[in-house]
C-alpha cells in the first residue's frame, strides 16, 4: 500500500515537471528559483526594519525610566557642534606700527595659503584650524617684536658683526695657508679647503664647530627644527606650545618654508656675485682691471667661459657687413677680443700643464728689474716699508730712523715757527715757550741718535756732530739745523754697499716692485725729473715729534712703589656733574683717583694723581709696544663706547684697573723688565699725563717686529682694543684691514701710517661727530620705516605680485663663471689708489681676491650666515644662555670629535717658570 502511494507521488510529480517544462520551457526552473529567493529576501528585510523601529522606541522609553539624567554640558556641546561654525575674530596688530603690521600680515597670509591651505581644504572645510595656526604665528611675532624693542642693538651692529666677519675671514686665510703648506706643487681642491676650514674653526673656537650643519642637508634641517622649537618655546604662551599639532605645523613652516630657503639663497655664491655687481653698478668696467683678473685667475672654468664668450663675439663681428668708419671700430674690437682669447688660452695651457710660476721669484732670479731711486723710496709708503725691513736686517735701521726723524722735525719746526710768526703779527708773544719746545725736540734727536750714549748710534763725521752740539748750546734751533748731517746720512745709505746697493739685489726689492705694480713694466714711472706717477707725494716718513720728554727717573731696587685706585672722583670739572663723571667742553668722562705710595731708604712719600681710562689705555699701548712680553701678561679692561658712564660699569672698571695696577707693580714684573720703571713713574707722577703714544712710537720705532702668533689662534675680538682712540669706525676699519690685507705680519710703522690715513679720512668726512652719526644710523636701521622696508623686500622676493616664487633654476656654468670674473673686476675697480699707495698694489689685489674667494664656497657662506644668526639670537635673548645651547646643537660635529681625540692623545705641555 505504501509502495503504491510512493509510486503515485513520484509519478504525479514527474508528470507535473514534464508538463511545466513543456509549457514554460527549460529555463523556467531558474526563474522559479529567483522568485522564491526574492520572496524570502523581501520578508527578511521587512522583518528587520519592523524590529529596528520597535527597538528604538523601546530603548527611548527605557532611557527615561531606568538611566540617570545626563549632565547639562553634554547637550550644550552637542548643540554647539550642530551649529554652523562662527568666524573667529583675530587682532591684526603685531608690532604697534601699522607700516610693519600690514606687510607682516601679508607674509602670514601667503605662508598659510601656499604651505597649509592647498592640502588642508582637501581634508576639511572647517577653517578654525587655520585660524588657530594664524593666531599662534601672531602671538610669536608679538613676543618677538616686544623683545626686540627692549634690546640695545648698537653693540651688535658695531662690534659683534665685525668680530664674526673678521674671525670668519681669519679662519679662511689660515685654511688657505694650511692647504698651500700641504702640497706646494698641487693645487688643493675646494673639498680640501672646506675640510681644512672647519679644522681651523675648531682650533679657534675650541668648543664648537658647524661642519655638519653646513655640509649635510639632513643635519641642517634637524638643526633648524630644533632651533625653531626653542624659539617657539620662548615666544608662545604655554597653552599654545603644549598643542603639539599646532606647534609642529608652525615649526615646519618656519624651518622649511622660510628659514631654509632664505639661508640657501644668502649662501649661494652666484647670488652673492650678482649682488656685488648690482651694488657697484655705477662703476664703469675697466679694461686694465679685467685683464689683470684674467692674468691672475687660477680657475680654468673662468678662463674657458671668458674665452668661449670672446669666440662667440668674434664670430658675430666677423659676420657683420659694414663699411666706412664702422669697419675700423670693428677691427679694433676684433683685435681686442683676439688678445683676450690668446691670454686665456695661454693661461689655461699653463695651469693645465702645472707650470705656474711665481712672478716675484722669476723676476728675482732672471728678470731685468727697473731701478727705483733712493729719494723716491724714502717718500713712498710702500717702498719705504720694504727698505725699512731690509735696513733692520742689516743693522742700519738707526740711519734710516734718523733721516725720518729729522724730516719730521723739519716739518714740525716749520709749522711751529709759522704759527709763532702769525701770533707775533697779532701782538701775542710766546717766543720763549715755542723755542724751548723746539730746542727740547732737537736735543732729544741728538741724544737719541748722535751722542755717545745713543744705542744704536749713527756713526758720522765727528766734526759735524761737534758743530751740531755747539749750535744747540749757543743758538736757537731752526728747521735746517740737521741738514748737513742728514745729507751725510743720505749719501751713506746711497753709496754704502751694505745698504741701498745691496737692497737692489735682495728679494725684498723684487717684492717692493711687485707692490708698486712695476714688475709688469720694466720702465720706472717715477723718474728723477719729477715726472713719476706716484713718487712726488709729501714724505710719508714725516714724523710729528712729541715735545714732552719722558721722566728721567731711573729704576732702583731700594725704591718700592705701591698704588691703588682709591675712588672715582671729579677734579676741576663741572660742579653739577655726577660724582666721578666729568664734563669738559661737552665731553663726559670718568676720572680715577690713584693713591701712590713710594718708599725709599731715606724718604716716604704719598700723593694722589688723577687719570682717565684713555690715559691708562695710552700707557698700556706704550709699554706693550716697547716690551713685547707684557702683552701676554697684562690685560687692560676693554673699552665700552656706549653707556660707559653707568655707575655699575664704572665700579667694575675701577676694580679691573686696580687689578691691572697691582699686577704691574709686583716686584717680579719690575725685575723682569728693569727699563719699565721710568714709564711707570712717569704715569704715576702727580702731574697732568702727557698723551702721545702715536708720537712716542714714531720717535722710537720698535726694532723687533711683532709676531702676533698667539692672537692668530683666537677670535678677532681679542684685538678690539688695539687702537688709541675710542672711535668705532676707526676700530672697525683697522680690524677689517688687518684681516683682509694680513697687516698683522707687516711692521708697526706701516700700521701706524694706515691708522693715520683712516683717522684723517674719517675726520675729513664726518669730523668729531662720527660716533654720534653711527648711533643715529643704527637707530635708523632699526626704525619702523626700515624694518617695514625689509619685510616688504622679503615678501616681494618670496611672493612677487602675491604669487609664490618658483624655484630659480641654476644658471649655466659658463654664465656663473663670467659673473665671477665680472665681480672680481668690479671689486678691483673700486679700490682707491690711495690704499694701493699705502699697502701696495699686490697686497691690495691679494686681499680683495681673498675676500672674493671666501664667498665662492656655499658651505663657508652657510657657516657665516649661521654665525650671524647665532649672534643675533644671543643678543636678543641674553638671559637664556644661547651660546651653551648652540654648543650642544653642534656637539655631533665630526671635527669636534677629532679635535677632542687629538687633545687626549697629545702629550702634556711642559710647565714654564714665571
Image (spheres, rainbow, N blue to C red):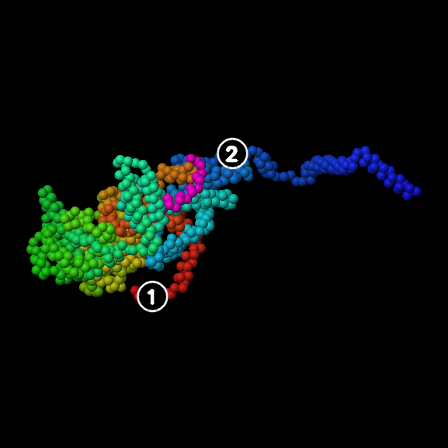
Q: Is residue 420 above or below residue 470?
A: above
Callout 2 secondary element = loop
How far, Cα to Cα, is label 1 from label 2? 75 Å
For residue 39, which quarter of the picture?
top right
Position of residue 208 relative to residue 43, above or below, is below
Q: Position of residue 868 (x, y in %)?
A: 37, 48
Q: Which residue is mark 2?
A: 87
Instruction: Name the residue at 43% across, 53% down.
Output: 212
Q: Are marks 1 and 2 in contact (CB under 8 Å)?
A: no
Image location of residue 36, percent across then percent down: 77, 37
Indicate the position of residue 452 as horizontal and vertical percent values.
13, 62
The reply to whether residue 70 is visible in this rendering is yes
**Secondary structure found at label 1:** loop
The magenta-colored residue range is: 801-817
Labelled disc at residue 608: none
- Mark 1 nearby-residue class (10 Å; few <14, some 14–19, many ≥20): few
Give the residue drawn at x 85%, y 39%.
Answer: 14
Q: Nearer the viewer, residue 895 or 579?
A: 895
Query: Does the magenta run of residues contain 806?
Result: yes
Could you tell me how many numbered marks the image carries?
2
User: Of marks 1 and 2, which one's residue comes earlier in the chain?
Assistant: 2
Residue 667 visible (yes or no):
no
The quarter holding residue 683 reads bottom left
Badge 2 density bin: few <14, some 14–19, many ≥20, Cα 10 Å = few
- On the image, which quarter does residue 311 sit in? top left
The residue that appears at 42% across and 42% down in the rendered structure is: 808
- The residue labelled by disc 1 is 911
Amino acid at each position: 500500500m505504501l509502495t503504491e502511494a510512493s509510486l503515485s507521488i513520484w509519478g504525479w510529480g514527474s508528470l507535473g515537471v514534464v508538463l511545466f517544462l513543456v509549457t514554460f520551457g527549460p529555463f523556467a526552473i531558474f526563474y522559479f528559483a529567483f522568485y522564491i529567493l526574492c520572496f524570502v529576501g523581501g520578508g527578511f528585510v521587512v522583518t528587520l526594519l519592523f524590529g529596528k523601529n520597535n527597538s528604538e522606541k523601546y530603548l527611548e522609553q527605557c532611557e527615561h525610566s531606568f538611566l540617570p539624567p545626563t549632565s547639562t554640558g553634554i547637550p550644550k556641546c552637542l548643540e554647539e557642534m550642530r551649529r554652523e561654525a562662527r568666524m573667529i575674530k583675530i587682532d591684526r596688530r603685531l608690532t604697534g606700527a601699522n607700516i610693519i603690521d600690514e606687510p607682516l600680515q601679508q607674509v602670514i597670509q601667503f605662508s598659510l595659503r601656499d604651505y597649509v591651505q592647498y592640502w588642508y581644504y582637501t581634508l576639511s572645510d572647517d577653517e578654525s584650524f587655520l585660524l588657530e595656526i594664524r593666531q599662534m604665528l601672531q602671538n610669536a611675532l608679538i613676543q618677538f617684536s616686544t623683545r626686540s624693542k627692549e634690546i640695545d642693538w648698537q653693540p651688535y651692529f658695531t662690534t659683534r658683526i665685525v668680530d664674526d666677519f673678521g674671525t670668519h675671514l681669519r679662519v679662511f686665510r689660515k685654511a688657505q695657508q694650511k692647504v698651500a703648506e700641504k702640497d706646494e706643487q698641487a693645487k688643493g681642491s675646494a673639498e680640501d679647503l672646506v675640510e681644512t676650514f672647519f679644522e681651523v674653526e675648531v682650533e679657534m673656537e675650541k668648543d664648537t664647530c658647524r661642519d655638519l650643519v653646513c655640509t649635510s642637508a639632513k643635519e641642517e634641517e634637524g638643526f633648524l627644527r630644533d632651533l625653531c622649537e626653542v624659539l617657539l618655546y620662548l615666544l608662545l604662551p604655554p597653552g599654545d606650545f603644549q598643542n603639539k599639532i599646532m606647534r609642529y605645523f608652525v615649526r615646519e613652516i618656519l624651518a622649511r618654508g622660510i628659514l631654509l630657503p632664505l639661508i640657501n639663497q644668502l649662501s649661494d655664491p652666484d647670488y652673492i656675485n650678482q649682488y656685488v655687481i648690482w651694488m657697484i653698478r655705477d662703476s664703469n668696467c675697466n679694461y686694465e682691471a679685467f685683464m689683470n683678473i684674467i692674468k691672475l685667475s687660477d680657475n680654468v672654468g673662468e678662463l674657458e667661459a671668458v674665452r668661449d664668450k670672446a669666440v662667440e663675439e668674434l664670430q658675430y663681428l666677423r659676420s657683420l657687413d659694414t663699411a666706412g668708419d664702422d669697419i675700423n671700430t670693428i677691427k679694433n674690437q676684433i683685435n681686442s677680443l683676439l688678445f683676450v682669447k690668446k691670454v686665456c688660452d695661454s693661461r689655461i695651457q699653463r695651469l693645465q700643464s702645472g707650470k705656474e710660476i711665481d712672478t716675484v721669484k722669476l723676476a728675482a732670479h732672471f728678470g731685468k728689474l727697473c731701478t727705483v731711486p733712493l729719494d723716491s723710496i724714502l717718500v713712498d709708503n710702500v717702498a719705504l716699508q720694504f727698505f725699512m725691513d731690509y735696513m733692520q736686517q742689516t743693522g742700519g735701521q738707526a740711519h734710516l730712523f734718523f733721516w725720518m726723524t729729522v724730516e719730521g722735525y723739519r716739518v714740525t719746526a716749520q709749522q711751529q715757527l709759522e704759527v709763532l710768526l702769525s701770533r707775533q703779527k697779532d701782538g701775542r708773544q710766546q717766543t720763549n715757550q715755542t723755542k724751548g719746545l723746539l730746542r727740547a725736540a732737537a736735543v732729544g734727536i741728538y741724544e737719541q741718535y748722535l751722542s755717545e750714549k745713543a744705542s744704536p748710534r749713527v756713526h758720522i763725521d765727528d766734526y759735524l756732530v761737534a758743530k751740531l752740539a755747539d749750535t744747540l748750546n749757543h743758538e736757537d734751533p731752526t728747521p735746517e739745523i740737521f741738514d748737513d748731517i742728514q745729507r751725510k746720512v743720505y749719501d751713506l745709505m746711497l753709496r754704502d754697499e751694505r745698504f741701498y746697493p745691496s737692497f737692489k739685489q735682495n728679494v725684498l726689492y723684487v717684492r717692493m716692485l711687485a707692490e708698486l705694480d712695476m714688475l709688469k713694466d720694466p720702465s720706472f714711472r717715477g723718474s728723477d725729473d719729477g715726472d713719476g706717477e706716484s713718487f712726488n707725494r709729501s714724505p710719508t716718513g714725516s714724523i710729528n715729534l712729541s715735545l714732552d720728554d719722558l721722566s728721567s727717573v731711573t729704576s732702583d731696587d731700594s725704591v718700592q712703589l705701591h698704588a691703588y685706585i682709591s675712588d672715582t672722583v671729579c677734579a676741576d670739572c663741572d660742579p653739577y656733574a655726577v660724582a666721578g663723571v666729568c664734563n669738559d667742553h661737552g665731553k663726559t668722562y670718568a676720572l680715577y683717583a690713584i693713591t701712590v705710595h713710594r718708599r725709599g731708604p731715606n724718604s716716604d712719600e704719598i700723593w694722589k694723581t688723577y687719570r682717565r681710562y684713555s690715559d691708562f689705555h695710552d700707557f698700556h699701548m706704550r709699554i706693550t709696544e716697547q716690551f713685547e712680553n707684557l702683552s701676554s701678561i697684562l690685560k687692560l679692561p676693554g673699552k665700552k663706547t656706549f653707556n660707559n658712564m653707568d655707575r655699575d660699569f664704572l665700579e667694575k672698571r675701577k676694580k679691573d684697573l686696580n687689578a691691572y695696577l697691582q699686577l704691574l707693580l709686583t716686584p717680579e714684573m719690575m725685575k723682569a723688565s728693569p727699563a719699565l720703571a721710568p714709564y711707570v713713574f712717569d704715569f704715576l707722577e702727580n702731574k697732568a699725563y702727557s698723551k702721545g703714544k702715536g708720537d712716542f712710537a714714531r720717535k722710537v720705532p720698535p726694532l723687533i717686529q711683532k709676531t702676533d702668533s698667539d692672537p692668530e689662534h683666537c677670535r678677532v675680538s681679542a684685538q678690539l682694543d688695539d687702537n688709541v682712540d675710542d672711535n668705532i669706525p676707526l676700530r672697525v676699519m683697522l680690524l677689517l684691514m688687518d684681516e683682509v690685507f694680513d697687516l698683522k705680519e707687516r711692521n708697526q710703522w706701516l700700521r701706524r701710517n694706515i691708522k693715520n690715513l683712516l683717522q684723517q679720512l674719517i675726520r675729513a668726512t664726518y669730523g668729531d661727530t662720527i660716533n654720534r652719526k653711527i648711533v643715529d644710523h643704527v637707530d635708523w636701521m632699526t626704525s619702523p620705516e626700515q624694518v617695514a622696508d625689509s619685510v616688504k623686500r622679503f615678501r616681494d622676493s618670496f611672493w612677487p605680485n602675491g604669487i609664490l616664487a618658483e624655484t630659480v633654476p641654476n644658471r649655466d656654468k659658463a654664465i656663473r663663471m663670467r659673473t665671477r670674473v665680472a665681480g672680481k673686476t668690479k671689486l678691483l675697480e673700486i679700490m682707491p689708489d690711495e690704499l694701493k699707495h699705502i699697502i701696495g698694489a699686490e697686497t691690495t689685489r691679494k686681499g680683495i681676491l681673498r675676500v672674493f674667494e671666501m664667498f665662492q664656497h656655499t658651505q663657508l657662506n652657510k657657516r657665516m650666515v649661521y654665525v650671524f644668526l647665532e649672534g643675533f639670537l644671543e643678543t636678543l635673548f641674553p638671559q637664556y644662555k644661547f651660546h651653551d645651547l648652540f654648543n650642544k646643537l653642534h656637539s655631533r660635529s665630526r671635527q669636534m670629535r677629532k679635535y677632542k681625540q687629538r687633545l687626549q692623545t697629545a702629550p702634556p705641555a711642559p710647565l714654564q717658570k714665571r
